[in-house]
Image (tube, rainbow, N blue to C red):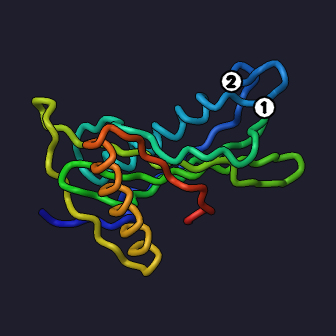
Amino acid sequence: MEGRTVEHSAVTMSQVMMPDQANPYGNVHGGETMKLMDTAAGVAAVRHSHANVVTARVDGVNFYSPIRVGNFVTASARLTFVSRSSMEVRVEVAAEDMRREEKKHALTAYFVMVALDDQGRPAEIPPLLLSSDREKELFEQGRQRYQSCRGEIESGGSFKVCREEPAF
């Protein structure tokens, strides 16, 4: 199976956050942002695998700053690691106050997406072709999270990702 690059599946999705997505104080609900992130992760995973995908887990959800009504929010998703049938997708969200021209990193999370065949079983996916030292570094970190996660699941524990700075 021929591999695909990180850029092949990278996706950016944006939207203006509206009052119906927020609490009475104008702060956007985390779930609204997570929905945008899940969609971006899913698109990136489908672009890479060319298969139906499902979200298997979400790890390392770190909220750095609040998102407000009226902010222009951008979710950037990139694959960081792939195994036989699963893909780790790092999604970073930026929130822009368009009136003040201020942009901030709002949150980051790792989505583990699994490719499925027509019978709903895990499907083999192409390898990830890495073209930069940063992509190789992120892949190795993803591999370590994958192995750690597998060990934690087998022992009945939980998996945590430390707070990290934006990767791209």
Q: Judge by depth and name the residue closer to the eye, 33 or 43.
A: 33
Q: Secondary structure at mark 1?
A: loop
The image shows residue 123 at horizontal and vertical percentages of: 15, 44
Q: Is residue 32 left or right of residue 70?
A: left
Q: Judge by depth and name the residue closer to the eye, 104 or 56.
A: 56
The image shows residue 142 at horizontal and vertical percentages of: 38, 61
Q: Contact (CB < 8 A) between labels 2 and 1?
A: yes
> Are there few (<14), some (14-19), or many (20+) residues within 10 Å of tag 2?
some
Which amino acid does the dot numbered 1 rest on?
Val
To which residue does mark 2 refer? 21
Which amino acid does the dot numbered 2 rest on?
Gln
- The image's mark for residue 69 is 1
- The image's mark for residue 24 is none
Q: CA distance from mark 2 to mark 1?
A: 8 Å
The image shows residue 80 at horizontal and vertical percentages of: 39, 61
Q: Residue at x 89, y 50 (%)?
A: 100
Q: Is residue 61 left or right of residue 155?
A: right
Is 1 placed above or below 98 here?
below
Is 49 placed above or below 117 here?
below
Q: Residue at x 73, y 24 (%)?
A: 22
Is 12 placed above or below 16 here?
below
Q: Residue at x 41, y 52 (%)?
A: 89
